[in-house]
Every structure is written in C-alpha cells, then in structure tokens.
Image (spheres, rainbow, N blue to C red):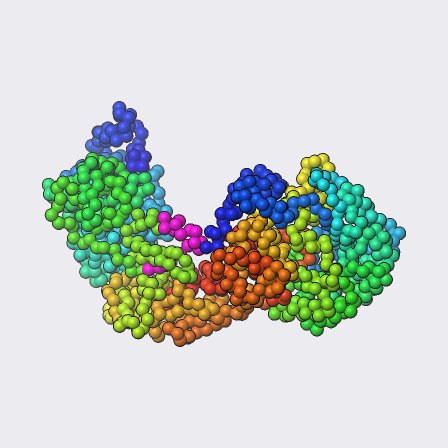
Amino acid sequence: MAMASAMDLSPPTFFLSGTSSSSSLRRLSSISVSSFRRHSTRRLQLLCQATAGTQPQSGLSESGSKLAARSGQDRLLKVPISKIRNFSIIAHIDHGKSTLADKLLQVTGTVQNRDMKEQFLDNMDLERERGITIKLQAARMRYVYEDTPYCLNLIDTPGHVDFSYEVSRSLAACEGALLVVDASQGVEAQTLANVYLALENNLEIIPVVNKIDLPGAEPEQVIREIEEVIGLDCSNAILCSAKEGIGITEILDAIVQRIPPPRDTAENPLRALIFDSYYDPYRGVIVYFRVIDGKVKKGDRIFFMASGKDYFADEIGVLSPNQIQVDELYAGEVGYISASIRSVADARVGDTITNYGRKAESSLPGYEEATPMVFCGLFPVDADQFPDLRDALEKLQLNDAALKFEPETSSAMGFGFRCGFLGLLHMEIVQTMCSNPSLLPQPGQRKSVEEPYVKIELLTPKEFIGALMELAQDRRGEFKEMKYIAENRASILYELPLAEMVGDFFDQLKSRTKGYASMEYSVIGYRESDLIKLDILINAELVEPLSTIVHRDKAYSVGRALTQKLKELIPRQMFKVPIQACIGTKVIASEALSAIRKDVLAKCYGGDISRKKKLLKKQAAGKKRMKAIGRVDVPQEAFMAVLKLEREVL
Amino acid sequence: MLKTTISPIFSSFTGKPKASRLIFQACKAVLEDTPPSARRNASTNLTMLHQGPPTSAYVHLPFCRKRCHYCDFPILALGSSSSSSNLYEEGKEDDPRITNYVNLVVREIKATRAGFDTKPNLETVFFGGGTPSLVPPKLVALILDTLSLDFGLSPDAEISMEMDPGTFGAQKLKELMDLGVNRVSLGVQAFQDELLKACGRAHGVSQVYEAIEFVKKCGVENWSMDLISSLPHQTLEMWEESLRLAIESQPNHVSVYDLQVEQGTKFGNVYTPGQSPLPSETQSAEFYKTASSMLRGAGYDHYEVSSYAKDGFKCKHNLIYWKNKPFYAFGLGSASYVGGLRFSRPRRLKEYTNYVTDLENGAANWCGNGNVDLKDVATDIVMLSFRTSKGLELKEFGEAFGREVVNSICKVYEPYVESGHIVCLDDMRREVMSDEFKTLIANDEMKIEDHVRYLRLRDPDGFLLSNELISLAFGVISP
C-alpha cells in the first residue's frame, strides 16, 4: 500500500531512468532524478514568495503552485537536524485547522492540486463525515526559506476533549504549535486546554488569527483576547485566511524562524515517542512516531519500553501525507514503522521505542495507562451473534488500546460484554457510570459510594452566564469560580459528577447559548455521593439492564419517567403487566400495561391462508426482535429509549 | 436455547436438494436420511403431510351486485341494473359476463390434469364468492358436470354454495338443489337495517327473512348463517339481538366473523380499528365472547374460531382446509393446495383469462412452482390446527417434524397453559392440568405426547388471542 501511494505522488516520467523492477529502487532513482531540478525550483520558489508578499490576497498563482509542486517532490531529502521544524496546529472545531493544513500541504507542493481532497488530514471517512478529527496523522513538507531547504513536520492533533492524552503526546512530539483562532469567534475552552498542554510541553506558540476575510471578523479584539486569556505575546500574530490563501507563506516563514529546531541527539541511544498508531489488516499495527534521540533503521530490532514487546522494523517511512518508505530516520524526524505488530496495545500512544540491542536508559516521560471512564453493556439481539460480537470487539481493540471489554451475562439480555471507554465520544451512545449497576452492593453491605467528578470550564458570552449556571446547578454542579476573560466573555468553573455530564450536557450547553459557549473538562477523581440503585421491575421481574445508579434527589423523577416511557414502548401482552421503579424493595413509581383483549383473525378467507400466514409470520418476527423478560416481551427499542431517557432526565 | 435444539432436524430437511418439486420426493429424501426407527413412521409422515390426490374443490364465482364496504375479495360487481328486474326468477336473459366467466372456469377445470395414480371422487365442492347465487343454475350445472366428468363426484358429496338474501328465490334454490347443491351458506351478516346499510350490503332485513323462508321451504337441511360482529355503530344489544334471531331461525351451522378492516376497502379508508364508530377492542372481545356463550348455550359446538355447528353439521369442506388436506381451486383469485404447494390464481380477470389460455397451451402450471419447505408445512399445520377445537395433535406432529419441536412448543406455551389460554388434553380428550403439564415439561425423560395428546386454544379466551399464541409457535418452528 505504501508503494502504491508513493507512486501516486511521483509523476511517472521520473521513473524512466529506473532499471530495476523493484519499486523501492525505482523510488530511489526517482529521487536522484528529481534532485537535479532542485536549483531551478528553489529560485522560482523565492519568486513565488515575493509575489505572495506583495499581493497576499491573490493567493497562489497557477505557475507558482506548479513550481512549489516540484519542490514538494524533494521532501524525502535529508536536511540537517537544525533545519527540521516539528509543529502542530491547535484550534477549536470549525476554526479552520483542516483547511489551513490543506493549504500548507498545497503551498509546499506536498500534495498536488489534482490530488487535493478537501481536508486531507482527516482521512478517515468517519471523520470527514462528522467533520471532526479523531485519528491524528502527520505530514512531512519541504520548504525553502532564504535559499535553505527546511523539513517541516506537521503533526495533527485530535480535536475532541476525550483525547486529551493523545493530544498531549502529539504536542510532546513537537517544538512548536500554531494557535489558530477564528477571527469572529474568539478563544474557546477546548483551545485553551490544548494551549495549556502545549505550554506544559514548552512549545513555541505562534498565534494565527484565521478567517480574517469573513464579514464578522474582529482580529484586533481576538488578538487582545489571546493576550488577556492565555497571556501570549501577540505582537507578531499572523492574520490569515486559509480558505483564501492569505498569509500562508507568512505562516511557513514564521514556523522556520520562530520554532526551535530539535536537539541534535542523533548519537544517543534511540528513543522515539509514539503519538499515534492504527491497525492495518494486512500489515499489523502501524506506529507513528517522532524520533527524539538516536536513529532507527529499516530492519532494526526495536523494543517498546512500556509494553515490553519487541519487533523487527520491516518497514520505516515518512508520512507526506501518504506513507513513503525510507531507510533511516534520525533525531528530530517524524515517521512510521510497520513491524507486524499484532495489537495496538503492544505499541500504545506515549510508549517509547528504543533499540533492542542498545536500549535507552529511561523511557520518555508522560506515558499513561488508559483507564476507561465510561462503561456500557453490549449484548447481541440474537444470542447466536455472540461470537460475531466478540470478533468485532476484538478487531476494534486491535485499533483502540483504550477499549476494554470483558464477557458479561445478564438474565435478561443473555451473553454479552461490558465495555469500557475513555470518554463520551469514545463510546458515543450508552451510559452507565458505575462499571455495572447490578454489582452495586446493597446499602447494608457498603460503607459509602463514590462517583467520578469532573472539573468543567465553560467559556461563554456574558449574556448566557445565567443559563449556564442554571444548567450546571441542575446537574449537581458545584460552583468554583467565574472570571471575565474579555469584556464580553466569561469563564465559569464548576465541579460536577461525570454522570451528570455524560449524555446531553454538551447539547444543552450549545442549545442554551445558541451555540456560543464552549467547554472543556477533566476528570478530577472520586467523591463520596448519595447514590442509590434504581431498579426496574417488569411483571415483578427485575430487569437488570434497566437498573441505574442515580442520586437520591433524582430517583423519583427518573423512576416516574422510566416507568411511563416503558409503558409506551412495551407492547401489550396477553396479561396485565405492572411496571415499577424501586429503590430496594420500595416501589417509588408504578404503571401498568393492560392486557390485549383480542387478537384473532375471524374472517372468511376460504382456503387462501397465505395472507393470514404472512401476518402471523410478521408477528412472530416482531416477537423475535424482543427480549423476553420473564413472560414479557420487551423490544430492543425500549432499552435504547430508556438509556436515552435517562440521559434526558438525569 | 429452543432455537438451537430444533434447528438440526430442520436443517436436515432443508439441506436436501431443492430440485424435488413435490413433497413425496422431499419426504423420501428425508426418510432415507433418518434412522430406521424413524422410518417406521413413514406412513404417518405422509398422512400428516397429506400428499394424496385432493378430494375437494373450491370454485370461485366472483359476481356481486356491488362491493360491500369491508370486502377485499376478488369480485366482479355487476351493478344493480342487471339484477334489478327480477332476481327471483329464472328465464331472463343471462348476463354475458357471467356466461363468459363460467366458460372460462370450465376451461380451467378441463385443462387441469392432475396425473395422480388414483382418481378418487370429489367429496366436497364449495362455490364461494362473490355471490355465487347470482349465477344461473344452468351455468352451475355446467361446472358441476365438468367437475364430475374430469374428477368424478361422489354421490354423497357435500356441495356448498354461498348465497345472499335478495339474490335467489324458491325456484332458483330448488333448481340448484336438483343439481346437487345440498348445503347453503346464507350471508345474513346482521339483523339491523341500519347496520346492513352502513356496511354496504345490497339487501335489507326483510330480504333476510324471505331468504330464510326460501331455505326452509325448499327443505335445505344443511344450512349455515353468516354473521359479522364489530360492525360500525354495532352495540352489544344489537349483536345479542342478531344472535338471538339467528338461533331462532335454527340453522344447523353458524359462522361468526369478526370485522377485519382491510387496507384498500372503504372501511379501511375511513375507519381505524378500535375507534368509533367501530367498537373498541374490549367491546369487540365482548362480542366474540357473547357469540360463543349464546351459541354454545343453544346447542352449537364451537368447532373453529369462527364456526359453530349442531351435531353432524360441521362444514366438511372447511375441515379439509383446517386439516391441511389438499384441495383444488378454480376461478378468479382462488387458492389451491395440491402436492404440498399452495398456489393462487390471478385476481384480475384479464390475467386470469391469460392464465387459463396458458394452462391449455401447457405454458402455465396449475399447482404452482417451488419447493415444499417443511417449516412452512409445520407452520401451516400449527396455524390451521389451532383454529379448531380439536387443536394440534402432538403425536402425529412430532412424528412428522421431530419430537424436539413438540417439546419446544410445549415449553413456549407453558405460561399460557397456566394462564388458561391453552388447554392440554390427553388421548381421551380429558384435560391435563397445568401443574401436571409443568411437571411433564420439566422432566426430560418423559415423552410429553404420551401424556398430552392435544393442545388447543381455550374457548373463548385462547381463541381471542389466537394470533398472539400461534405466532409464539411460529417463532419456535422457524426461528
């Protein structure tokens, strides 16, 4: 696959001089041929820069982009460590990170115009569909500044708060970052969190105000906000419009000028930081890394210091943005390794790769074990599908080291799995905060119950402060602090139970502030809480999957809502069915489903039984889709809807 | 668990080459594969699956004066003009539409070459509709003659005809009886003019009384009255009145249908089941129970979900359906069951005409194509048996489809035996109590069918929920 992508990037004419049939040799020869053209390219690149300097709003001229494209062919060439710049882009969703990244790839000729897919970095279909970046990737670019070629590595960071650990590891692989802020929106909470992560990693931050071409743009105010909120010197902030191509060369120049080069530690024992990995069904796990110290060669026996696994590096290469094989990578460089690694758990983000024969003394700091914060039970509709579900989960786990699961049996749902996820998006659908409500000991058998708490920071225009405080208060939030970060915008700090935030908190935040507020959260630990288990009894049978753990104050309203919803969702049966919500043995809410009185086809239909039979078959199929709780058939939708409802009520 | 325990036996059936068109082969193939002990039951298997030549024929005569508001059958409305002059008398010019259609049916019968080794006489013939009584007797004679010639007609065959009040007089009925029609099914439906009008019937109550009079005058001993419950605006008082008047007219058979609101009918367009002016579900259930208790109180045996008969007057033809026995069918939209295959003829006259032509040319097949799927046979048997008061005979069913299925069905029904919706009977048809049934199920050593020979739906509570209960068994048979 890497071969194919390499071929895509190089025009076929370059291959003419190749004599060997081996693709990798052909690629080497193509490099030597293309390097011929370097001088002319460089001159024209300068020309192009001049043009861009005088007429920034015109963007790239047609001829300029062609020449840049040729320069892009040289990006595999080695440069001294002092000419390497590693950076990432910190931006809030929709503030234009992907567009800017695309533009950088285009201007440096890394991706040719004809290959340009919109938002190149978000290459998973799922990401493109949802417009968010989950899997980070990297891109190696070549940029010639003042006659000197530089190697720029853009390391992408995931945009969602669930992935703050991954973000921190990506940032740790860089020396600098572009802080991209929308000229009409201002600093958002998530951006802030990531900037702090970047500052913690001692990154040089270049403020970039994007979308200055939009009518609502207020770049001066946004610059002031960045200065006030983050405390960054914005005297040389860059104004740009990634969409219109304004300010792109300034950004590239600033990367070269202001971001420090990596330390030259190429002679030390190898230490490479893994900032991403994914599972390829044909090649095993592909690991993305930044070489911090030393060098790594194709064929080296490498050792993963946290997992303790060792493999032979079958293939190493760079991402540009497709995978292109190289023979060696040294300190400061960014690339990938394919080593027939069986599971991503063997090569987790944050782990340190070292040389098996010449191990580093210590691993790189910052590695953390993944601890699931959100759990859900996962059961197949049809018990026969249990092995399929297991296979599917195992495959998912190959690609997601943070996904944990173990078999679970439930009287109502049969065999399934209890799965643990890092956070909300990670799981996306289901909630339950205790690892399994049915395992919560009875009140007499426990001393206290604790639940995970989060600290949330809300950034909002001041007119929505009241609405947000009300929301946080409703969710058992404990007010901590409020400050104005700008004349019109406030930061509000709350601590509240994770369970209250799971579900529609974010949706509520958006709807109550017309989309203007943003939030960021981090888990701050466990606290004792007055939690109780709320059980649902259908026809006097306890339905474990419907049990929830709620705060005592909310038990009644949740119980009422649950029983009412279930009454709507469960079809009537051949007998009366009571539906109850209980705390222990005490019934706190109760509804009843009346019995079906008549379901008979007493019609004259002669010998033509086909239609009647079809009807009965449909009816039987309907029953099959339901779970039998004792004598009651409960449709799957009831379980799903109840989970949804819990989120609404809680 | 149930699913897995029964799937092997079915997979051994379905795994057979699907080429075998008729079930004889299918069964043979199965039997060759089964151990010798099972092979002893070969005859039972074949009896259960009823693969002999049919001895029953349904003939569809689709003509009506107008379509009733609830009707979704394939009918041909003649309009009132053709029938207004003198419906009670013969001798007027025949409607060419009827003549042409009957000729078509005759051609269809002639083109049907069964090719069975034996040719037993027909024991039952049923003229259904539509309103068969609109067809002139001499055309009925033509059909009966053709049937007799092609298949043979037993001298004591039951020959039924559906007749509507207002479409026949004493003379016509007499002529029909002379032709051999010996059972009349009279479509009364209700004894209230306003209800008859509201459902678009072409007759009123006075014609109902006249028709009953003709039937009695002509000495039709075996006659049935059809009634429909849950009509729009029907009250319990009206329903009780209809039942009382029906009983007073002393038919030997009563069919009580529950209004089914079908899509595409006038009722389907304007009414929603359970909502006014239709009775609520509870009222509707009450109507059903009232019919059951009043008619049984008057000496009728509730032998099928919607059928009641005095001793010796069950409808033999309908029993063929419910016993899953084969039958021929002729005419527009009619459904036959021959060689294990169900086949419905085209419901539109033009396509039906083409079908008959194709049949004559050998371009069409009269019994349908496809394979006999044993799961389908099993579900048919369950569905049809549970409609009757006899119920499902477990021994025979187990021998044909495997004892595991019987066990699974019993398990799934256990709660409903306990709740009284399902009745267990031993081979003497004495009720087996639910506690005993429970013990039998729990004990794997025991053969349930040695102790419980029949399962049936209780009248009326089980019958009222028959769809629910039957679909439970469907779920077991074809998971």
What is the x, y in percent for residue A22?
27, 28
Above or below: residue A199 compared with residue A461: above
**Quadrant in the picture for residue B304:** bottom right
Q: Nearer the viewer, residue A46 or A457?
A: A457
Residue under the image location 82 percent in, 48 percent down? B141
* Magenta stretch, residue numbers: A375-391
Is A439 within the magenta?
A: no
Q: Is residue B120 left or right of residue A501?
A: right
What is the x, y in percent for residue A308?
19, 47
Is the N terminus of chain A in the top left, top right, bottom left or bottom right quadrant? top left
What is the x, y in percent for residue A442?
32, 71
Is the C terminus of chain A in the top left, top right, bottom left or bottom right quadrant? bottom left
Residue under the image location 57 percent in, 50 percent down? B399
Is A389 within the magenta?
A: yes
Residue B35 visible? The answer is yes
Q: Is residue A202 left or right of residue B184?
A: left
Q: Is residue A620 left or right of residue A383?
A: right
Above or below: residue B297 compared with residue B411: below
What is the x, y in percent for residue A638?
45, 62
Residue under the image location 42 percent in, 65 percent down? A543
Above or below: residue B461 compared with residue B130: below
Q: Is residue A443 left or right of residue B404?
A: left
Above or below: residue B415 compared with residue A393: below
